[in-house]
Image (cartoon, rainbow, N blue to C red):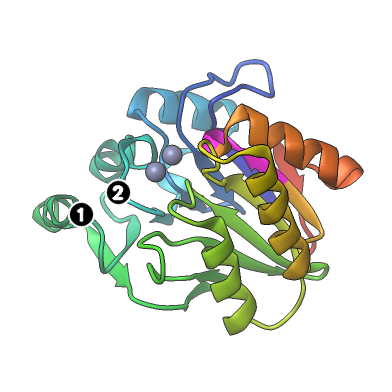
Amino acid sequence: MKLQVICENTSAVEGFKPAWGFACMIGEDILFDTGESDAVLFHNLEQAGVRLEDIKMVVVSHGDGDHTGGLMALVERNPSIKVVLHTVFPPDVIAHMRNCGANLTLAETFTELAPGIHVTGPYPTREQALVIRSKAGLVVVTGCAHPDIVEILRNIHDNMEGPIDLVFGGFHLLNQTKDETLKTIEAFRGFGVRRAGACHCTGPQAIQIFREQYGDDFLEVGAGTTIEIET
Ligand SMILES: [Zn+2]
Ligand SMILES: [Zn+2]
């Protein structure tokens, strides 16, 4: 299965526009998060060769504008798309989706969206992550992961079987000291996380520490980055 980052603060591939936010294609027809604007989302989807009508489902991690920016326009352009939010999403976004007549699901807890593809639901952090079963282990995709990436991973570790092969996305460690980030990485190791792709709102200092600590197992992530996983 191919995962392709569509929106990220930086651009990793020529033609993809950088913009603060996050979005990632999961296989051929699932989009996780929608970046900060429909213009950047649609531009970068086109660069990736994804047609809007081919996206069957959009899953959104949380209600911040840098993850929901393209959602309304996407639903307008593709009204049959399945929208997966969660039960503690901002009520105005839920109301707007209902008013649009969107095909809406609100995840409350771990839910299998497609074979091997799960969403965690919003607990304990009010934000949901996506988890894919691959042959090498679980692959976790996060939006911002605030307030706490460690709690998100603990929840996955406690509720889903198998090692965690890869975690990538925003880890929201902007305000951490160096020692705090090293403790966070220790917690990652404690959950058996083999590879990490810290990006988006992780913060430059924390990204650099992850890069040093994970070495060859650190994944550089920007708009256009492609990750192949065996499912
Ligand atoms: Zn956020
Ligand atoms: Zn964010």
Nearer to the camera, 182 or 126: 182
What percent of the width, then of the height, locates residue 38? Answer: 34, 29
Crowding near the residue tagged with mark 2, few <14, some 14–19, many ≥20 C-alpha atoms within 10 Å? many
Residue closest to the far right: 216
Residue topped by disc 1:
90
Decide which of 27, 6 is in the foreground and name it: 6
Determine contact: label 2, label 1, CB under 8 Å.
yes
Any part of residue 207 in sight: yes
SS at badge 2: loop
Q: Which part of the image, by quadrant, shows the N terminus?
A: bottom right
Disc 2 marks a residue whose amino acid type is: Gly
- Would you say the beta carbon of the disc 2 residue lies within 8 angstroms of ligand 1? no
In x, y percent, where is residue 25?
A: 56, 46
Q: Give the numbered dot on residue 41.
A: none
| Residue at 80% from the left image edge and 62% from the top image edge | 230
Specify the principal SS of the magenta part. Answer: strand
- Indicate the amino acid at tag 1: Pro
Magenta span of residues: 197-201
Residue hosting label 2: 63
Which residue occupies 29% across, 69% down? 106
Q: In the drawing, does residue 49 fall left or right of residue 196?
A: left
Decide if residue 106 is on the left or right side of residue 153: left
For mark 1, does the 10 Å Cα neighbourhood hold few (<14), some (14 to 19), or many (20 or more) residues?
few
